Amino acid sequence: MYDYIIGKITYIKNNAIVVENNGIGYLVYVSNPYSFELNKEYKVYIYQHITEDENTLYGFKTIEEKELFLKLISVKGLGCKMTLPILALGEIDGIMDAIERENILYLKKFPKIGDKLARQMVLDLKGKLEFIGVGISDDSNKVEEELKEALLALGYKEKEIKNVINQVNKNNPVEDQIKEALKLMLR
């Protein structure tokens, strides 16, 4: 079983890409092949679908997209080939929100998804999608909370902290964020 392939995109088809790694070209079906650039290296997250008459690779740019794909294909009546257009036409957050809010009309806008299948998606997945993408947001929330606690410990008021936290570069380590926040407080 593959988890991901790091390689150069050597060919783009209307529904797939070829990822070359160590002289081997892997044909990988993706939701939006034109989001990849030729001759550029990518980390493509892979799902390998094996049946008695086929061995197919499906690829994703992000781990969240792969996780959502795996949840969607677990729905009765929804296979790999029907799931790719859902990912191509919808945003991950939009799809998850539609399932959580039981928005059948939103789900029916996808190709080959009728009323019955949209209701099956809600039935099978509602309440089971909250983990997707959580790793990133949880880490940023922890870092922001750490920054807030550090500034509170230094005697700053919550109102002052809220104004400064939004201006701090969230990509920096916590220590650098604290220094940046202190500089902003002293202005």
Image: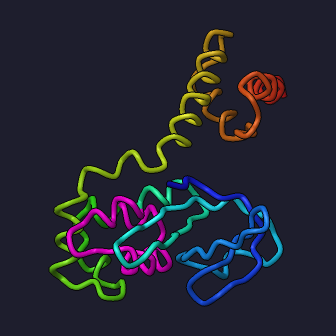
Question: In the image, 117: left or right of 159?
Answer: left
State the image coordinates of residue 166 (x, y, percent, origin top left).
Answer: 66, 40
State the image coordinates of residue 125 (x, y, percent, origin top left).
Answer: 25, 58
**Residue found at x 21% / y 65%:** 122
State the image coordinates of residue 73 (x, y, percent, origin top left).
Answer: 33, 67
Question: In the image, 145: left or right of 85?
Answer: right
Q: Is residue 170 above or below residue 57?
A: above
Of 129 and 18, nearer the camera is 18
**Residue found at x 56% / y 65%:** 60
Instruction: Confirm whether the magenta stretch covers residue 183.
Output: no
Q: Is residue 174 above or below residue 7?
A: above
Look at the image and tell me in which quarter the C terminus lies: top right
Of 121 and 70, nearer the camera is 70
**Residue found at x 44% / y 81%:** 85
Of 167 and 10, nearer the camera is 10
Q: How many marks?
A: 0
Quarter of image, res 169 = top right
Quarter of image, res 44 = bottom right
The colour style of the image is rainbow
Magenta residues: mostly which secondary structure?
A: helix
Q: Residue furthest front?
A: 52
Quarter of image, res 86 = bottom left
Instruction: Confirm whether the magenta stretch covers residue 89.
Output: yes
**Residue found at x 68% / y 10%:** 154
State the image coordinates of residue 103 (x, y, percent, origin top left).
Answer: 25, 71
Q: Is residue 66 above or below residue 37?
A: above
Range covered by the magenta-colored residues: 69-96
